[in-house]
Amino acid sequence: MTTRGFPEGFAWGTATAAYQIEGSVTADGRGASIWDTFAHTPGKVLNGETGDVAVDHYARYAQDVALMGDLGLNAYRFSLSWPRIQPGGRGVNGAGLDFYKRLVDALLSRGITPYATLYHWDLPQELQDAGGWPERETAYRFAEYAAVVHEALGDRIKHWMTVNEPWCAAYLGYGSGDHAPGLRSPELAVRAAHHLLLAHGLAAPALSGNGGLVGAAPNLYAVTALTDSDADLEAARRIDGLQNRFFLDALLRGAYPEDVVADLSPYGFADAVKPGDLDLIGGPLDFLGVNYYSRHTVTVAEGASGVVATSPFAGSSPWPGAEHVAFVNAGRPVTDMGWEVDPEGLREILLRIAKEYPPVPLYITENGAAYVDEVVAGAVDDEERRAYLEAHLAACHDAIAAGVPLRGYFAWSFLDNFEWGWGYGKRFGLVHVDYATQVRTPKASARWYGRAARHNGLS
Ligand code: IFM
């Protein structure tokens, strides 16, 4: 019996990203991305693993889409590989576009609505060689890429997300160096953050043609100070500013928060922002994606370093001006990533956006958990992941009941895949992948989630 029903038309999907699943990194003219380079650099990814093969989705997409359909899902969020479509960051590679046409046609034939992300971290290497996201020019190149994509796929795809988790792309890529391209400079990171948002603003008009709906997918956290000391409250203000308000205010209000601009002024942030940029960034947004995993509980303690465990090699802080902050666990159970399970934080964020910002339809564009899974007699009983999904969907249900315009939920991830600096060591999939044979086995969580999707609610 369905006791917690969701609104009619609610999107029940899963999410993936190109470099994490596709493999086939030289097929059909694909160029190299910064993640190809980074993963092939010794000491950057656990066990030297790369996305060269990943879960071979490029070759197996039809089987994967069929499985989604069989499970009963009605939506799928995936990313387009920029260097597949524009090898070298220029021109048009028809063969690369054709892959996404085939993928989307397969989705549509199963009644699965495609939600496409243009940038999930795989910048063409040549654009990085020219300076990458700290260079303003990269944002203009992204707008050209968006126009190419929309021209080719705008008849089939209506839901577009420009940038995925720009905080990660900027601060892990150019600040802590835990992600590609692996640079460690707060000055570069803050410029990258602005240019990723500028890229969104410049690309949006092209994507909105032909009935396109445009969104972005920042990763947001509930943020709490460990104590009510002035120092901890100040730490929470800084982290909330860098992680949440910077992106929300820019996208939804067309302004950066003044306190964050002040925090970032020692790093030359203001110089990167040109007249008119914020009008573009804060232009019409058809929906906002929310990637939510956990809460940051922050404190200031002796020896704190601002380091967060975003890679097994994490060594420096991705938080300009907040390097003195420590991230602590507040006693909740943790996933295999060490992230606290906190569904209340999701409800909190959804209510906050609805209360503090101009109205905008919302989607949970990522939410999920890594656990250690084992195939036993052909089955994976991942009760912890199932419970994680149920608790977070219940938080969504509560938020909707409180008036939040939440339109869909995408579980991260459809398949086990390449988890960036952790390589294949962390499994987020609802579907287990045997990396030696590429055999897919839906976990118990996938069956449970598919039932919820088919009933449009939780029982
Ligand atoms: O795997 C990532 C994804 O690429 C971006 N969001 C967080 C996920 C889990 O770390």
Image (cartoon, helix red, strand yellow):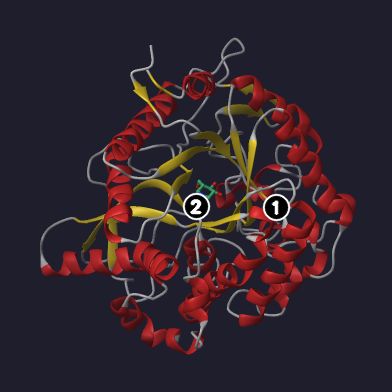
Q: Marks 2 and 1: CB-CB under 8 Å?
A: no
Q: Nearer the viewer, residue 377 or 25?
A: 25
Q: Which residue is mark 2?
A: 312
Q: Nearer the viewer, residue 373 or 122?
A: 122
Q: Which residue is mark 1?
A: 80
* Label 2, residues with CA under 10 Å away: few <14, some 14-19, many ≥20: some
Query: Can residue 185 be seen by looking at this rendering?
Result: no
Query: Can residue 109 be seen by looking at this rendering?
Result: yes
Of badges 2 and 1, nearer the viewer stands 1
- Check the picture and name the quadrant holding the N terminus: top left
Q: How many marks?
A: 2
Rendered location of residue 377, percent (x, y): 59, 9
Q: Residue at x 47, y 38 (%)?
A: 409
Q: Is residue 309 above or below residue 386?
A: below
In the structure shown, which secondary structural element does the residue marked by tag 2 occupy? loop
Q: Residue at x 76, y 45 (%)?
A: 23
Q: Residue at x 37, y 68 (%)?
A: 249
Mark sitting on residue 207: none
Of mark 2 and mark 1, the one earlier in the sequence is 1
- Farthest residue to the left: give it: 229
Dividing the picture into quadrants, the one containing residue 231 is bottom left
- Check the picture and name the quadrant holding the C terminus: top left
Q: Amino acid at mark 2?
A: Pro
In the structure shown, which secondary structural element does the residue marked by tag 1 occupy? loop
Q: Amino acid at mark 1?
A: Leu
